[in-house]
Amino acid sequence: MKTVMDNETRLALLEQSYKQVEARLDKVEIKIDDLKDQMNAGQKGMIKTVYVTMAAMTTVIISAIGVMLSMS
């Protein structure tokens, strides 16, 4: 009878441990999803910055060509 209770106790402890691990994994998954969202937002901001910089450089180049043509 003692062996049966020991097995039941072990099973209960394993079940409790499993639930704790599952809860921790849920928290990790949520944090990973948050990090993914933050990375995507950061990449979108960087892409906008690159576009604005490219537009400004293009404007400067076109203006320089216009000034050079008007001087000749």
Image: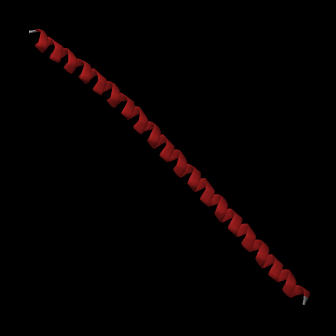
Residue at the far front in the pictured view: 3
**Is 28 in front, or is 37?**
28
When the figure is inspected, residue 52 is found, relative to residue 36, above or below; the finding is below
Residue 17 rendering spot, x and y as whole percentages: 30, 23
Residue 72 rendering spot, x and y as whole percentages: 90, 90
Residue at the far right in the pictured view: 71
Which residue: 50% across, 43% down? 35
In the image, 56: left or right of 24?
right
Residue 48 rendering spot, x and y as whole percentages: 62, 59
Which residue: 34% across, 25% down? 20
**Is 19 in front, or is 37?**
19
Residue at the far left in the pictured view: 1
When the figure is inspected, residue 45 is found, relative to residue 57, above or below; the finding is above
In the image, 57: left or right of 47?
right
- Total marks shown come to 0
Residue at the far bottom in the pictured view: 72
Which residue: 57% across, 55% down? 44
Q: Quadrant of residue 70?
A: bottom right
| Colouring style | secondary structure
Q: Quadrant of residue 65?
A: bottom right
Quadrant including the N terminus: top left
**Is 67 in front, or is 3?**
3
**Is 60 in front, or is 24?**
24
Residue 57 rendering spot, x and y as whole percentages: 74, 70
When the figure is inspected, residue 53 is found, relative to residue 62, above or below; the finding is above
